[in-house]
Amino acid sequence: MTILVIVEHDNKTILPATLNTITAAAALLEPIEALIFGNELEDVAKQASTIASITKVLSANSEEYAHNLAENIAPLIQKIASDYSHIFAPATTFGKNIMPRVAALLDMMQISDIIEVISSDTFKRPIYAGNALATVKSSDPIKLITVRSTAFDMADLNGGSASIETITASGDSGLSEFKSSELSGSERPELTSAGIIISGGRGMQDGANFAMLENIADKLGAAVGASRAAVDAGFAPNDYQVGQTGKVVAPDLYMAVGISGAIQHLAGMKDSKVIVAINKDEEAPIFQVADYGLVADLFDAVPELENKLS
Amino acid sequence: MKIMVPVKRVIDYNVKVRVKQDQSGVELNNVKMAMNPFDEIAVEQALRIKEAGDADEIILVSIGPSQSQETIRTGLAMGADRGIFIEAPHETEPLSVAKLLANIAKQENPGLIICGKQAIDDDSNQTGQMMSALLGWSQATFASAVSLSANTALVTREIDGGLETISVKMPAVITVDLRLNEPRYASLPNIMKAKKKPIDVISIDTLGVDITPRLSVLKVEEPETRKAGIKVGSVEELLTKLQDEAKVI
């Protein structure tokens, strides 16, 4: 048995969710190889070869992989799939886009978003937005799996010395074409890998007030998030959204400011190690999951918090 | 151009899901069911494309128990033209659903298949991508904006860290994200009209798809619940707790 892990990167660095995925794969105690694809990816391929527990890196360097188009990548993975018992990818928008296409080409049923590896064919995954957990056993000869990054620690990016093998590109499908991207380009850590997150809800009243949270975030090295209510009200951009329909996070510290705690938000953050809630409504459901609750007007409490952190 | 929209009947998103005592699944008896919210967005997008003059027929397809016809009826009341219902003897996995839908697509030849990015029951997020692969079509997942030109669709996708715009050749499968649009409510006259719209019932046996599940569900359990902690009296106390007790800052 050999396991293949699909590597996600931004051409400069390996993205953290891949490291969580490798930890999930390592639970099976079998050799792990990594597949990396892109254009001009020598540096990141080298980086992948230093990850502890990776025995070999397969690198597909070609223009048609520059933008992670599923129609180009799925045939590449399909071509090498029969060498592996398991193929793991992070359950990020990258992995979610590509893996089901691979699964259908191979006629295998994918196991999405696993949070626990129970055995080589049995895995635990959340259903109903995490309101239930299903243990599922696969009868397929190759297990195609996406991994919820917050459920696993990150593998060490040092200590490995895998060989890098170049593999032949599979060509451009001609079906789709990348046009442009608008990345938020924040200096703060990514929500899904941040150790501390401070999120605002409808109680923030205005997008401009998110600056208060950003100031605290910068002091703590934290990421800034938002509830769906705040995003829908236009206070914060879409990619800030934490919840069932946004990002699922599990930082060491999650601070919910002016967030009432709708089920849809709780589904995205309830696995955080420590939860703090600041809300003036003491009946707000967020207090039922908070380790530390402060009943206060956020417009008093947040500036005070910022001052005391200086 | 025809647009095909697969719709799934799921537990209403407002209902608190209960796990069965015997851990065999989730309680579905006497629970309010509704169209998967992402599928509603897909129906709405198809309607907008038709209203803009870029499509002439919208076909809804549902696979499931006989009550799934009510879900099709909901979409017909929103404005779709006709429905196709495939009764399934048991729960069907995304791979089987994708195969069944791909077969219907081969018969109907739509220029676009628009579907929800995931169903809110099993949260798999697979069917659209699988269908696209089986048909050899292009795919544009997690769409937050769609515009059509002669042979291509320009789709803005919600990706981690921002947005990305791609151009896909049609026919294409587009899976929709939450912010693409706000689905309309069906008006009473349209609900009445929808009762007369046709729903073809196709027997699953005629589609030549093996729907035997590849995954067996061994157990469904409740997640651990979090207990409420303590209330602190001041910002000062909060900081002290975070530093000295929780040691997270």
Image (cartoon, coloured by chain):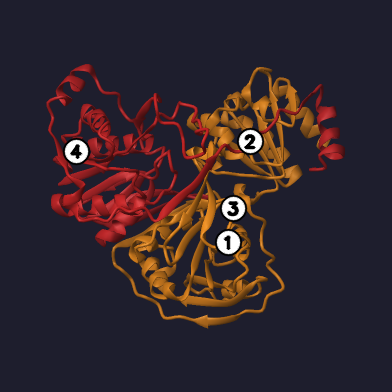
Chain colours: A orange, B red
Marks 3 and 4, how far apart at CA:
44 Å
| Whether label 4 touches label 1, CB < 8 Å | no
- Residue under numbered circle 1: A18
- Residue under numbered circle 3: A116
Q: Is B117 positioned to the left or the right of A244 in the image?
A: left
Specify the subunit that label 4 lies on.
B
Marks 2 and 3, how far apart at CA:
27 Å
Few, some or many residues within 10 Å of mark 4 (<14, 14–19, 20+): some
Few, some or many residues within 10 Å of mark 2 (<14, 14–19, 20+): many
Marks 3 and 1, how far apart at CA:
16 Å
Few, some or many residues within 10 Å of mark 3 (<14, 14–19, 20+): some
Q: Quadrant of residue A97?
A: bottom left
Q: Which mark is residue B50?
A: 4
Q: Are marks 2 and 4 on the same chain?
A: no
Q: Earlier in the sequence, mark 3 or mark 1?
A: 1
Q: Nearer the viewer, mark 2 or mark 1?
A: 1
Against A16, residue A265 (above or below) is above
Q: Is A102 positioned to the left or the right of A263 in the image?
A: left
Q: Position of residue B115 (x, y in %)?
A: 31, 44
Q: Nearer the viewer, mark 3 or mark 1?
A: 3
Q: Position of residue B80 (x, y in %)?
A: 20, 34
